[in-house]
Image (cartoon, rainbow, N blue to C red):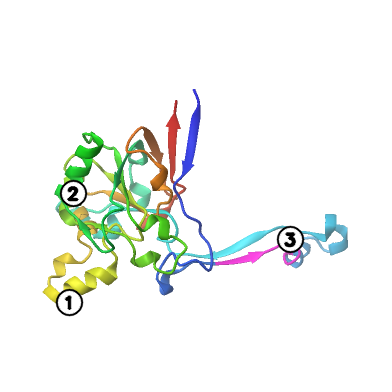
Amino acid sequence: MARTLIDLSIYLENDVVSDPPPYRPKIHYIDHKTSVPELVQFFPGLQASDLPDGEAWAIERVELITHNGTHLDAPYHFASTMNHGERAITIDEVPLDWCLQPGVKLDFRHFPDGYVVTASDVEAELARIGHTLAPLEIVVINTSAGLRYGQDDYVTAGCGMGYEATIYLLERGVRLTGTDGWSWDAPFVHTKERYETTGDASLIWEGHKAGRDIGYCHLEKLHNLEVLPPTGFTISCFPMKIRAASAGWTRAVAIFDS
């Protein structure tokens, strides 16, 4: 059996707009020369010249939030409760079998930035690709944000999933979803305009808030979704096990067996 792996994750890196300014990652690189003083302090009498090529180790000091890079959001991120009043589970409590399942890609690249996807949009796309959802399948949405990663407008790009579109998936047994946009919902800049016009607070983070009714997880800031077919692959996205956290970083991968 031949196996092909496709990386669905973005980098954790400096100097690329992957989050709004207050939330961006900061990585400080300590190279083999800079770290020499740290090594020699462990061994009295050791000189830098005693080391091969005068080098110690390379390490990195990283300042992150759990929502930097490609990550998996737990139901606790969305609200304190799920399933109509149960305590929302945190990332360390997410069932592992949610995180390794057949994948389904819905192609919504044709929708404009800020568009809120509806249940009928999801239904139409499933009909187009000829697929009926099965419980626990991982559904990822390919938006116009995917190819904008690395550009300054990435965090405002792409469509988002509304409440009714999200519930449509969850009612069919889906428990883990994903997007190549910055957020599962439409970017805030667009939601802000709708809220200013209507005064309707239910529009804010409506896709996320579906988790109050049916607990689920979603991946954000995926990459390379445009190269995936609609079906025929497995997604692996096990999150970092962080105690009582709202999210965990993941190296999401699409797996093709033939």
Could you tell which of marks 1 and 2 lies nearer the N-terminus?
2
Residue under label 3, please give it. Answer: 32
Residue under label 1, please give it. Answer: 196
**Is 214 left or right of 233, judged from the image as shown?**
left
Amino acid bearing label 3: His
Q: Nearer the viewer, residue 168 or 210?
A: 168
Viewer can see residue 199: no
Q: How far apart are the alpha carbons under marks 2 and 3?
A: 53 Å
**Is 79 left or right of 157, judged from the image as shown?**
left
Q: Is residue 13 magenta?
A: no
Mark 1 and mark 2 in contact? Answer it, CB < 8 Å: no
- Displayed quadrant of residue 27: bottom right
Could you tell which of marks 2 and 3 lies nearer the N-terminus?
3
- Displayed quadrant of residue 138: top left
The range drawn in magenta is: 27-35
- Displayed quadrant of residue 49: bottom right
Tell me: residue 228, above or below residue 167. Answer: above
**The label number, if any, that marks residue 121 in the structure image:** 2
